[in-house]
Image: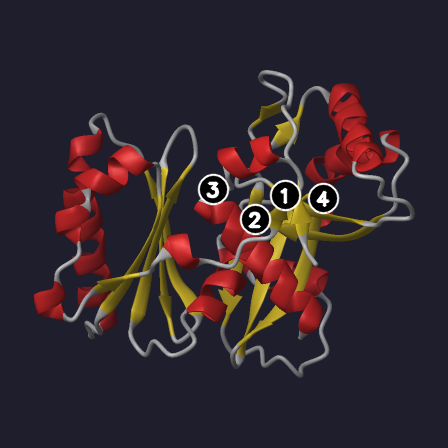
Amino acid sequence: MWLWRAGLLPQNSIRDGLPSEREAMAELLADLLFDCDVVGGQLELVLPLEGSHWRVLEGVPPEMQIQPSDLLATNADLNWPLESEDSYVALTPCVDQMLLVGCSRSHLQAWIDVVEMADLPLRRVDWLVSSAQRGLMHERQQWSGDVAWVFSNEASYRLVVIRACVPELDCCFQLNNDDDLAVELRKRIAAWQSLSGSAPALAWCLCLRQELLSELELLIDPDRGETSIDLEALWMPKAVLSEDEAQGLQALERLALQGMREDIYR
């Protein structure tokens, strides 16, 4: 059985995806596991939105034996924002292609430091976005159209368009007025469909706060064959405490947990 437990991090303890209060975060992590009576547990670390990047690699089949670092050194057209010699990267299969995911070594080491301060074993590292994408694809196995996935951080919105289980478009944008969000999303979807030369029906996955969801009700157009993904029906681990259950998990976090769960049982 999967259980979840929440803890309150110190204010401003994560900045630009980096832990700025490492000792306090390590103490919280160790205390949570102790309170839950977890002995001999291993951690799977899911990195925050900021600081990590991904690219879809065309022409690199999943069965090809190649080192991720070699790809960074030989592919100048990746538009990769990280220095190849100072990056931690991993390759994961994505249908008949490969997905390159990475972050800077200093970024990863900062989080490893937190785990080491908590004196806990680290089993695996993943990224919130790539793990959530796996969870989302599990939820939409029978959907043949595109998926328009929208989520946000404190500074910007992010639109990922997934076609045939492959993230084909990933763009970030900022708005001065949230009332313009629906218009901005439609503009970017229209531009993508024009560029790709096709316009399959969309399934919208809106991982946004409730007040924004109410404002975007008219975004989904059933006359175009569009639908929405019922995030309330997502798989949910059982909360350890009643206050955790009352607080709930964000939709993006639930998708990431689903992706981790599916990856383990694959």
Cα separation between marks 3 and 1? 15 Å
| Amino acid, disc 4 | Asp
- State the residue position of label 1: 47
Counting from the top left corner in percent of width and height, residue 159 is at 34, 50
Indicate which label's residue lies in the foreground, 2 or 4.
Answer: 2
Which of disc 1 and disc 3 is earlier in sequence? 1
Disc 4 element: helix
Cα separation between marks 3 and 4? 32 Å
How many labels sit on residues? 4
Counting from the top left corner in percent of width and height, residue 193 is at 21, 66
- State the residue position of label 4: 86
- State the residue position of label 2: 128
Disc 2, disc 4: CB below 8 Å?
no
Residue at the limit of the structure toward the front, as seen here: 242
Which of disc 1 and disc 2 is earlier in sequence? 1
| Amino acid, disc 3 | Gln
